[in-house]
Amino acid sequence: MDARTRVQEKGMAGNNGAMKLVAGNSNPTLAAAIGGYLGIPLTKAVVRRFADMEIFVEIQENVRGADVFVIQSTSFPANDHLMELLIIIDALRRASARRITAVIPYYGYARQDRKPGPRTPISAKLVANLITHAGADRVLTLDLHAGQIQGFFDIPTDNLFAAPVMIRDIRQRFELSKVIVVSPDVGGVVRARGLAKRINAPLAIVDKRRERPGVSEVANVIGEVAGSICILVDDIVDSGGTLINAADALLEKGADEVYGYITHGVLSGGAVARVTSSSLKELVITDSIQPTKAVASSRNIRVLSIATLIGEAISRTAAEESVSSLFE
């Protein structure tokens, strides 16, 4: 059964179980694309600011008894978009929505998933608590920075993977016999190994030593990369330092070309300029975060859409079908 058929079957009398999509301001383009895939328009809603920048939300359609999916990444400005998400959920709860699913393509604060030192917060857990207490019944997100964040929620949480979208693109663009999948650090080995296995490619690792936060130093490349096309795989590219240093190290070891396939293009500060002027042949990101004008105009950054992946997951969730089978 395809997604649109599932949606049509959900359109019962009144709103009893009908599917609704509500979008905040973080990524309207992705939200519209998801609605287009599902064949349903976004629910009319106002999400705006008062003069003092307080957030005001008004849902302008009846959602009583509906199965509502709130599409909102907590990307820059992270705090504003997080508050939008919480207030939208509260508005829907008070409007008697039957079930509220927070669809968070990019889950901000995920890098604060443990205590790196004394008297520091675990902000990823705090954000999970806020979303739960606001009234969300379940969460649907993409490529969490750390898998254990699923356990921070006391409600059902589905962690989707962008790997199928990336693998499809890699198969179309590369001769796989020349490809080596590379983890830019030891912590990302599991993610890189999973993608390498799917395309039957060897794996290499860049051993990175971080001297202080925000600064990375490449120490060694583990694996033979000479004469190969290297594909760096990770979940987040922020400043771009780790990725660029890894690309330089691989080229020094004889790699022919280096590409980056990263799910979340945070690309803060001057990251786009650094990537554009770097030795990376191409950086491929998804639209889990709304691409900026700088990203769109960059010569070596390309964006893959995850609208179909998330739309299908929403459709299966609404129909009480398996979501994990998307990745088998």
Image: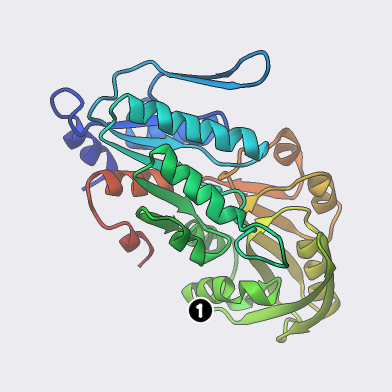
Looking at the picture, tell me which residue is in the foreground, 138 or 268: 138
Disc 1: which residue: 200
| Residue 171 rendering spot, x and y as whole percentages | 52, 64
Looking at the picture, tell me which residue is in the foreground, 244 or 52: 52
Q: Look at the picture and state if 286 lies above or below 111.
A: above
Residue 325 found in image quarter: bottom left
The amino acid type of the residue labelled 1 equals: Asn
| Residue 4 rendering spot, x and y as whole percentages | 26, 38
Q: Look at the picture and state if 256 lies above or below 265.
A: below
- Please name the residue shown 73% across and 53% down the image: 238
| Residue 221 rendering spot, x and y as whole percentages | 77, 82
* Disc 1 packing (10 Å; few <14; some 14–19; many ≥20): some
> Left or right: 275 with respect to 3?
right
- Please name the residue shown 64% across and 40% down the image: 78
Residue 115 found in image quarter: bottom right
| Residue 166 rendering spot, x and y as whole percentages | 53, 59
Looking at the picture, tell me which residue is in the foreground, 223 or 179: 223
> Left or right: 328 with respect to 88?
left
Looking at the picture, tell me which residue is in the foreground, 277 or 313: 313
Q: Look at the picture and state if 74 lies above or below 60.
A: below
